Image (spheres, helix red, strand yellow):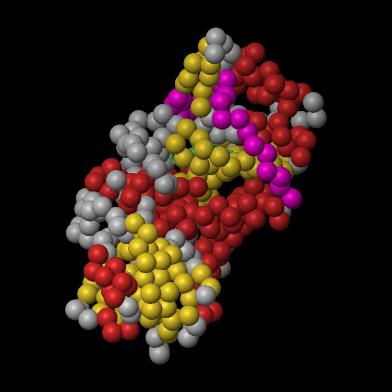
Amino acid sequence: MQKILVSKIKDFIDKEIALQGWVLNFRSSGQIYFIQLRDGSGFIQCVVSKNEVNEETWNNCNNLTLESSIELSGVVTKHPKKDEYEIQVKDLKILQIADDYPIAKKEHGPEFLFDKRDLYLRSKTPWAIMRIRDSIFRSITNYFAENDFIRFDTPILQPTSCEDTTELFSIKYYDEGKMYLTQSGQLYLEAGIMSFGRAYDFGPVFRAEKSKTRNHLSEFWMMDAEMAFCDSQQSENIQEALIKRILKDALENCKIELEILERDITLLQEIVKKPFIRMKHYDVKKLLEEKGMKVDYEDDLTTEEETAIGDIFKIPVFVEDYPFKVKAFYMKKYTDERGMERAVNTDLIAPEEAREIIGGSQREESYEKLLEELKKRKYKLEDYEWYLNIRKYGSVPHSGFGVGLERVVRWITGVHHIRETIPFPRTLNRFKP
Ligand code: 4AD
Ligand code: MG
């Protein structure tokens, strides 16, 4: 008899098969057991009728507990109208009877579930979220492979800061002194594209921001992309195509998962077909002011402002050219018609309260200007010698961006808090298990 995965069940209607998995739930009506089995690939109802099975199988059913591991065999049947399948069980064996499972069916608070994260990951909601996360990860790597990028892994231990506007975790490095956990591989990617033209990295990054918002993690996964001979507008084109690819793949391949999460996908389906909005930071602030918000033209966008942009446009918006003083040292800058120094950058703001999902910019390609900025910010020049070399030997206009994986997962899954989007979250007040 063939052992199969629940995800392949459609191909085995009326056939006898074997499954291995865990008991998600069960109920009995005296003569029949209904067992909800999960095997990692999906969920299925298995029906055990007392007068169809031998005594051993029936006794095993009587001993079942939540999360016990089992093996069973039976015949696959299909619901006459719906796309639903069942197993009419012939034989059931127990691999292990699980102890009293702490996550029972009753409602638990989120803190309890995160304390028991190792077990809670078995539940349907995290199962669906992690599978969508996997789809997004795959869409990103496929998109880049198909668009002439090479994967270029950047170091996690770094001697300097990349994002000077956010806090770093530091560690003692042998007898050499301090090193930092990376905030972004961008600076190293800039060196990489002088060899490969287009490159991206994908890995964990770390931010010691004392931020308690539902959009901040201390450890998260970032994909940085960097392109030589590319300006900010061309970079936005790539970002837009990438996000649309991610959405399209998720809508196509994660139907079951989105259903489990009860995600209303109407807006996501529309977004795939429409061009994203591109708007200057100044114009965005002005619009929000006209809508009655109190805004600061010289500052970053606030949480409320980013949320409002999403609600107004209901499609991702590239907000361009922030005040330079709130942005990182490496960005190209110019002085606008009102005399304000601005960065040639874009943050991509997603709707449905998802807020900033990508941060990117055109990089300063002039050796002299970059040197001047490093001096202005009082950075140790010897630490940046290698980075300055990028501008010394064949400098070219180049741009790049960083996608926060969990921010995208939060948007597509529609979950409330970003900690739901990573297997074992690290935040200001959560670092176990
Ligand atoms: O905007 P950020 O700080 O940009 C950079 O790090 C650039 N060096 C990227 C580049 O140009 N290659 O971070 C990029 C993205 C943000 O847009 C956001 O999606 C995500 O990373 N992000 C966070 N996600 C979760 N928790 C946090 N604390 C985050 N901080 C940033
Ligand atoms: Mg940012």
Q: Residue at x 51, y 35 (%)?
A: 205
Tell whether position 387 is magenta.
no
Q: Residue furthest bottom?
A: 80
Q: Position of residue 80 (x, y in %)?
A: 40, 90
Foreground of the two, 101 or 16: 16
Q: Position of residue 279 (x, y in %)?
A: 52, 50
Foreground of the two, 26 or 425: 26
Task: Give the side of residue 376 with respect to residue 53, left or right.
Answer: right
Task: Give the side of residue 210 with respect to residue 298, left or right.
Answer: left
Magenta residues: mostly which secondary structure?
A: loop
Q: Residue furthest front?
A: 55
Tell whether position 158 is magenta.
yes
Task: Give the side of residue 162 with respect to residue 148, left or right.
Answer: left
Residue 197's quadrant in the figure?
A: top right
Q: Residue at x 56, y 11 (%)?
A: 176
Q: Position of residue 38 (x, y in %)?
A: 39, 64
Foreground of the two, 130 or 159: 130
Above or below: residue 252 compared with residue 32 = above
Q: Residue furthest right?
A: 394
Chain part drawn in magenta: 148-169
Above or below: residue 154 compared with residue 93 = above
Q: Residue at x 53, y 16 (%)?
A: 173
Above or below: residue 223 compared with residue 185 = below
Q: Position of residue 208 (x, y in %)?
A: 41, 29
Above or below: residue 423 compared with residue 94 = above
